[in-house]
Amino acid sequence: MNDPCGPSYDPSSGLYHLFYQFHPAHIAWGNISWGHATPTDLVAWTDVSGWERYDAVAIAPGPPGSLDHLSVFSGSAQFIPVSANQTCGLPIACDGCETVLLAFYTAVRHLPTAWNLPYTPGTETQVLAFSSDDGLTFSKFEDASTAVNPVIASPPEGLNVTGFRDPFFALWPEMDAILGVASDDPHWYAVLGSGIKEVGPRLELYCARATDLTEWTYLGPLFAVAGNASWSERFSGSYGYNFEVAGAFSLRERRGDGGDGVSVHHFVTMGSEGGNTTLHPLVHWPLWAEIDIARAENGSAASVTRSSVVRNSFYDAPHDRRLVFGWIPEDLNVLQPQGWAGAITLPRELFVSVYRDLANTNDVLSQNGSWTAVQEADGRWSMTTLGIRPAPDVVTALRSNATYARLENVVRAMSNTTEPEFIGIPRGTTASVGFALRRSPDGEEQAVVVYDPVAETLTIDLSDSTTLDSPYVDTANHIAPLSLLDTYNNTCAGVDGDKEGVMREPLALDIFLDNSIVEVFANARVALVGRTYPARGDSLGVGYIVGPGSGEVTFATLEVWEGLLRVWPYRPENTSMPLVFDSPAKSGNYTWWTGV
């Protein structure tokens, strides 16, 4: 599996829905279809039509010659109210339905396609499909009497594109207001990932009236940058050459997160392809940017970017928040014996995080970072950024049957999940600090989550995580910059002070260990994911570590929760299945995909 698709909430049933790209009965990319799962609480998940092989398919590629006969690429989904006067201009038949589930995805009929290959016209078109049975089956409007696809047939005219895919669509009242759309005529907006060869990646913006989702109007690029550019070599990955899995939304500041309860911020999200930076050598990055949006002279929307990390998000109406899911790829290079590949992250909440009364220590706030910082009239600074944290209610539910313990010993034997928190690191401390996970008794194997206060980086260090040879597993480290903030006037629960009354915030870590997956959240503004594959059966230890250096480090509120809730109660613990190998005819003589 890879990209999460169509996260959504159905108000008529109270169910959440999440789709995902996958290759049925295979462990390598190809024949991309959508799987489908639902929870009532974002915790306990159920496969809508089964989990084995082809049972899991919700939307499959069509027959030869159809728009999507080679793949169903990523997209989004929304529940649309149904009434005598509201079908959004679509030929939808649904007796007794309160809502229908509308999927908007990229249909693929030419392969291979990639940002660095010549783009074949007609490769990617944007299509709609609907379900009147909560996503158990879908209709693609294929009958002559209902044919509406493709609703977006091609990229904008005259552009030599690197790609054109993964529509994210939603009502966007804030954009309506910016563009002067009448309140009684709301519009849907769609953002697609794309790029122009020899120029750079961009997000294309379309709109459609709520009364007719078959007619989409191109408004122009919502966000466009130069190829392989980066907002910041230190604080951002590269924008690469093509965007995919895009998104756009607005968030209001909340008082509980330091905001004023009034100010609204606009964000775009995208996955970048093909670029790299010195600190971030990978060629795929999930990025975000805060943008200022203004109405252009031609009536479309133009943006100016300020900031930069996510995947596929949705508005969680019951909790009035925005949640995002990400894809966790494998770092194990022997997937065939394993029989599966890929996972989805914990649901993460995105929010506007506001900090006030800050000291600009070492001029960190003056840099191009993943924030907006302003010096106020009194000389102190305020900072705004896109916050990210594991959904609190999901964390509480996961702990419901877990065993709780304080982390008192240097090494404690644990079989699975852990969650430590809060470390005080006074200013001037040079010693690195963190936690060892999946540690063998003799220390031969261990993954380490470590913070370096000198380099101001948080790292999932996998260099000693396994004794397997390097061809079989990727042990590259995952690194994120993280500067702990200094605040005046004791307005934060800092860990040290000086004569100027400056307090440093503690390092607050949430670490989730789920077999090979390590998800790390730091100070509600950094998220990292890594994989650890220890070869030894006794690599079960967890403990805190302090590296060499000067200064003091204080550990507080070190909690361990072991045995978190099982989130797939209806699947067997071992879901490995015998694999299918495609014939040359099925895989385009292995030019469309490898067939594995």
Image (cartoon, rainbow, N blue to C red):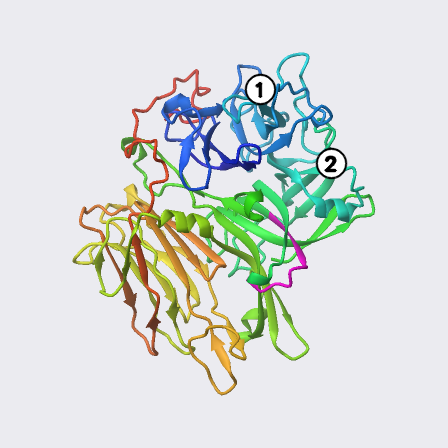
Front in this rendered view, residue 547 or 83:
83
Residue that badge 2 annotates: 218
- Image quadrant containing the C terminus: top left
Q: Position of residue 91 (x, y in %)?
A: 68, 19
Residue that badge 1 annotates: 139
Q: Position of residue 540 (x, y in %)?
A: 22, 51
Q: Position of residue 263 (x, y in %)?
A: 68, 59
Query: Quick check: 79 above or below 428?
Result: above
Count neighbours of disc 2 (C-alpha within 10 A) and say few if under 14, some if 14 to 19, many if 20 or more. Answer: some
Q: Residue at x 64, y 26 (%)?
A: 121
Q: Amino acid at mark 1?
A: Ser
Q: Which mark is residue 549?
A: none
Q: Can residue 222 be spotted in the picture?
A: yes
Front in this rendered view, residue 35 or 257:
257
Considering the numbered disc 2 on the image, is that residue within a helix, a strand or a loop? strand
Q: Residue at x 43, y 77 (%)?
A: 427
Indicate yes or no whether the magenta region holds residue 499: no
Front in this rendered view, residue 217 or 199:
217
Classify residue 452 by image quadrant.
bottom left
Q: Position of residue 374 (x, y in %)?
A: 64, 69
Q: Can residue 316 be spotted in the picture?
A: no
Stretch in magenta: 257-268
Left or right of residue 372: residue 583: left
Considering the numbered disc 1 on the image, is that residue within a helix, a strand or a loop? loop
Count neighbours of disc 1 (C-alpha within 10 A) and say few if under 14, some if 14 to 19, many if 20 or more. Answer: some
